[in-house]
Image (spheres, rainbow, N blue to C red):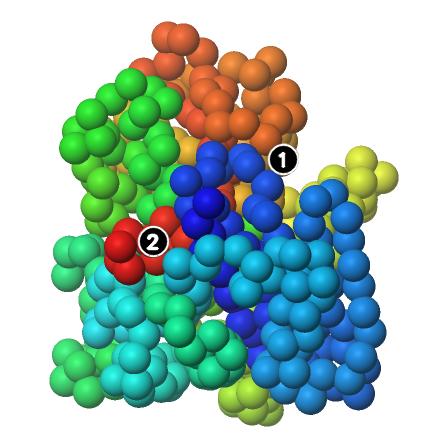
Amino acid sequence: MSYVLVLNSGSSSVKFQVVDPTAAATDAPLVSGLVEQVGEPKGSVTVKTGGEKFTEELEIPNHSVGLNRAFEIMHEHKVGPQDVELIAVGHRVVHGGQIFSEPVVIDDNAESKIEDLIPLAPLHNPANLDGIRTARAILPDVPHVAVFDTAFFNTMPQAAALYAINSEVAKEHNIRRYGFHGTSHEFVSQQVPGLIERDPAETNQITLHLGNGASCAAVANGKAIDTSMGLTPLAGLVMGTRCGDVDPGIIFHLARQAGMGIDEIDNLLNKQSGVKGIAGVNDFRVLHEKIQGGDSQAKLAYEIYIHQLRRFIGSYMIALGRVDAITFTAGVGENDDDVRADALAGLEMYGIKLDKEKNSVRSSEARVISTPDSAVKVLVVPTNEELAIAQKATELVS
C-alpha cells in the first residue's frame, strides 16, 4: 500500500499525517501527530497510530529536531517514512498568490517563489517554508508537493476578485481577493454532486466552512466564483477570534482616537475579536452553555455570527442565480445543528427546507439534511484537507 506524508507547518508547531490517498474521507489515517512549542524550552511530540497515543516532552529548538524525533517515534512502531511505501510528501501552503493556481512539485525555484509571497502571508508562509525545507532535508529522495489554500479561488472573475481601490496601487502591491480554505471548499464541493445525483458540470452550490476560522464560497459548475475571505483570512464571516468584514475606517478611528498602533489593531481584529471579543469564549459548545445560562453577551455574539452568515448565504444565492445545494463543513458546520438551523431559518420561500430530525442527528458521514421536497438540498459533508492534499500530491507525482 502506498502512502503520502502530509505536513502542515506553523511557526511553532507541525501537524502531520500518513495518509492512504485512496482511503474514504472518514477513514482514519495510518498515523497522525503533532510537534508543539517549537523554539520553546519545553516542547512535545505526539504520535497516534493503531488506536494508541505516544507523547514525549523534550526541548525542540527548531522544526528539524521536532520532525526527526517524530519520525523516530513512528519508526519505533514501524509506521515511519522508512517503514512504508512513501510516494510523496504533501505540504499545505497558505498563500500561492497569483503564481500558483495548481499544486506544484517543490524544487529550489518553487521554494524561492513561495518565499517571494511572504509579504502576502507573513504569519503563515514563513512557517510553511520552514516545514518544506526541513522535510526536504530529512526526506531528499521523496518528491515533495506544495498544495495552496488560495489555488481554488484563482478562477474567480475579476469583478469578484478585485477591490475598488486605485488599480495601480493594487497591482503594485498585489492587492486582491485571494480567498482561503480553498482545499476544503474544493474537496467538499466535489463530494456534493454525487450525494445529490447531479452532474458536477451542472451543479451550483454554496459551501460553508465553519470552524474557528470561517469562510464561504459560491461554486458554479465546479469553479469558485466568489468567496468571503480576501487579501487575508480576516475578511468575511464572523469567526472565533477574527472580526470578519468591518468598515475599514474603524482602523483609522482606532489609530487616531485610541492611539493604537498597527500591531495592536492587528492583534485586536485577528485575535481578540469575533465571537471571543463579544462573549469572552470562542468554543461554540461553551457559547451555547453560556446562552442557556442567560448570558446576554453570549447571545449577542451568536446573533451577530448568524446575521453575517445569512448575509453571505443570501448574496451568494443571487450571485449563482440557481442554487442546487448548501453544504456545511468543518468543526462548527459539521457538529452544531443550531447554527445550521438558524442560518437557514425562514428560507422556505427560496426552496430551502431543512429536515429538523435529520439535522439533529450527529454523524461523521456525509449526508443530506433537507426534506425530500426541498428544491435546494442541504448537506453536511465532513472536510478532510489532509486526504485532499494526499490525493493532489499523488495525482501530480504519478
Which amino acid, by three-letter code, is at mark 1?
Answer: Asp
Image quarter for residue 356? top right
| Residue 209 in view of the camera | no
Question: Is residue 86 placed above or below 366 in the rendered structure?
Answer: below
Which amino acid, by three-letter code, is at mark 2?
Answer: Thr
Question: Is residue 65 placed above or below 290 in the rendered structure?
Answer: below
Please state if 89 lies on the left or on the right of 42 as rendered: left
- The percent position of residue 345, horizontal first and vertical second, equals 50, 26
How many other residues sit within 10 Å of disc 2, few (<14), some (14-19) or many (≥20)? Answer: many
Please state if 95 lies on the left or on the right of 122 as rendered: left
Cα distance between the residues tagged 1 and 2 = 33 Å
The residue under the point 68% across, 70% down is 72
Q: Name the outermost residue toward the top.
A: 373
Disc 1 is placed on an element classified as loop
The residue under the point 32% across, 37% down is 190
The residue under the point 47% across, 75% down is 139
> Label 2: which residue?
394
Which numbered dot is residue 136?
none
The residue under the point 71% across, 57% down is 77
Question: Is residue 94 placed above or below 262 in the rendered structure?
Answer: above
The image shows a total of numbered marks equal to 2
How many other residues sit within 10 Å of disc 1, few (<14), some (14-19) or many (≥20)? Answer: some
Question: Is residue 67 placed above or below 380 in the rendered structure?
Answer: below
Please state if 10 lies on the left or on the right of 60 as rendered: left
| Residue 2 in view of the camera | yes
- The percent position of residue 306, horizontal first and vertical second, equals 54, 42
Q: Nearer the viewer, mark 1 or mark 2?
A: 2
- The percent position of residue 305, horizontal first and vertical second, equals 56, 48
Front residue of this view, candidates 221 and 105: 105
> Label 1: which residue?
336
Disc 2 is placed on an element classified as helix
- The earlier-in-sequence mark between 1 and 2 is 1
